[in-house]
């Protein structure tokens, strides 16, 4: 079975420039692994609060930044060692939708030209007639009227229209993996359902794998099959999205779920304590012999202060990194590929 995209024990750190006399390397991603099969499309959510490392994962998977340790593989080959042709295929197959795609559009080009450029670059079709047909079909698929859209500039489109334009481009390129980083966070609530429906349609009908990066557990629940809960760059819980959200096991996941607004003014949100915590540096990690969540957890045991927990399997498709549970140690990619 060919894995079109794979992350192996990816670690990422950045230098802190707050104190020029004592710079620290801050850990933002710690031993993250992921496998996306080409023959078995997946819809995987990566969720966590701001600063958990979600966007760093997206940029590393897209080849925009390099990991400090670990490797990213495209069809079994490290992306930094791809030939020019292989890297071109990687760029076509692995596409992204960001929070506001306006930043990736050239404001001097109209929509028709913006869509035609990648089709030409990747030689999807040859003739101008085929390009025009493909563009019109892709726009219609995402609910955009070609007549009303093609002659406009990006700034003349709404946020929702720009997001659908990005999806249309991915459809036209026949990409294999779509990485979305908070794709509906800057869109009006009335349009979010339309974008999410479009992503789900793309996954169900075209066989594209979806990596949905978000802080919103509600949209992750409705869109994805599996979910990874990330805390300060560490995977703390992973499994089927319904199992993880309906029955969260890690204290952090429980806090995330309890913070989801309830549409009842007589019911209060959870009053669980959520403390702040400083970023963990590499120097700290060397001496860090405890659970990474211990300073915010209400269920701390002696063992939590002495050693970091392993990711263990507690159910068939549900694993957690917490000393409060017993089970067999498991690799994250094994859970995701079940």
Image (cartoon, rainbow, N blue to C red):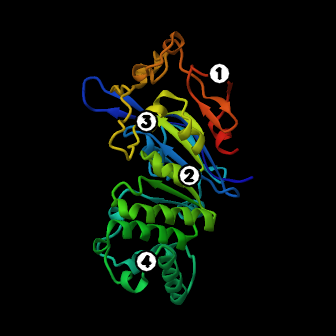
Q: Name which residue lies at 50% across and 49% down.
A: 220
Q: Pointers 1 and 4 in contact (CB under 8 A)?
A: no
Residue in view at x 37 percent, y 66 percent: 160
Numbered disc 4: secondary structure: loop
Q: Which residue is mark 1?
A: 326
Gap between marks 3 and 1 measured at Cα: 24 Å
Q: Residues within 10 Å of mark 1 (few under 14, many from 20)?
A: few
Residue position marked by numbered label 2 in the rendering: 224
Name the side, left or right, on which 330 lies relative to 154.
right
Separation of residues labelled 4 and 3 (CA atoms):
37 Å
The tag earlier along the polypeptide, 1 or 4, is: 4
Q: Is residue 248 above or below residue 284?
A: below
The residue located at (28%, 23%) in the rendering is 22
Would you say 205 lies left or right of 39 here? left
- The answer to whether mark 4 and mark 3 are in CB contact below 8 A is no
Give the crowd class for mark 4: few <14, some 14-19, many >=20 residues within 10 Å.
some
User: Is 337 above or below relative to 16?
Assistant: below
Q: Secondary structure at mark 2?
A: loop
In primary-sequence order, the first of circles 3 and 1 is 3
Nearest to N terminus: mark 4 or mark 3: 4
Name the one closer to the observer, 33 or 167. 167
SS state under label 3: helix
Which percent across, then down, holds residue 156?
Answer: 28, 75
Residue located at (48% from left, 37% from top): 230
Query: Vertical placement of 287 versus 110: above or below?
Result: above
Q: Residue furthest right?
A: 1
Q: Which residue is mark 3?
A: 258
Q: Position of residue 99 (x, y in %)?
A: 37, 56
Q: CA distance from mark 3 to mark 2?
A: 20 Å
| Residue 106 seen in this snapshot | yes
Separation of marks 1 and 2 at Cα, in angstroms? 27 Å
* Mark number displayed over residue 144: 4
């Amino acid at each position: 079975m060919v894995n079109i995209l794979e992350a192996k024990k990816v670690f990422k750190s950045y230098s802190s420039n707050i104190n020029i006399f004592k710079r620290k390397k801050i850990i933002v991603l710690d031993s993250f692994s992921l496998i996306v099969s080409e023959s078995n499309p997946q819809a995987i959510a990566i969720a966590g609060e701001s600063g958990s490392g979600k966007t760093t994962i997206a940029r590393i998977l897209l080849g925009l930044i390099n990991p400090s340790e670990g490797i990213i593989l495209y069809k079994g080959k490290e992306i930094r060692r791809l030939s020019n042709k292989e890297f071109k295929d990687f760029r076509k197959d692995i596409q992204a939708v960001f929070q506001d795609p306006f930043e990736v559009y050239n404001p001097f080009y109209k929509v028709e030209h913006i869509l035609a450029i990648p089709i030409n670059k990747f030689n999807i079709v040859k003739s101008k007639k085929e390009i025009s047909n493909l563009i019109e079909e892709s726009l219609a698929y995402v609910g955009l009227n070609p007549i009303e859209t093609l002659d406009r500039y990006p700034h003349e489109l709404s946020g929702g229209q720009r997001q659908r334009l990005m999806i249309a481009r991915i459809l036209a390129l026949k990409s294999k993996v779509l990485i979305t980083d908070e794709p509906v966070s800057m869109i009006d609530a009335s349009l979010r359902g339309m974008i999410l429906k479009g992503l789900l349609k793309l996954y169900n009908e075209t066989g594209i794998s979806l990596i949905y990066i978000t802080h919103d557990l509600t949209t992750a629940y409705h869109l994805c099959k599996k979910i990874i809960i990330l805390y300060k760059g560490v995977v703390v819980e992973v499994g089927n999205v319904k199992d993880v959200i309906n029955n969260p096991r890690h204290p952090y996941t429980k806090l995330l779920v309890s913070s989801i607004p309830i549409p009842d003014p007589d019911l209060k949100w959870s009053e669980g304590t959520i403390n702040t915590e400083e970023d963990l540096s590499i120097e700290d990690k060397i001496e860090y012999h405890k659970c990474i969540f211990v300073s915010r957890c209400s269920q701390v045991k002696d063992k939590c202060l002495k050693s970091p927990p392993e990711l263990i399997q507690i159910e068939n498709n549900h694993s957690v990194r917490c000393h409060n549970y017993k089970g067999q140690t498991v690799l994250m990619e094994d859970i995701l590929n079940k």
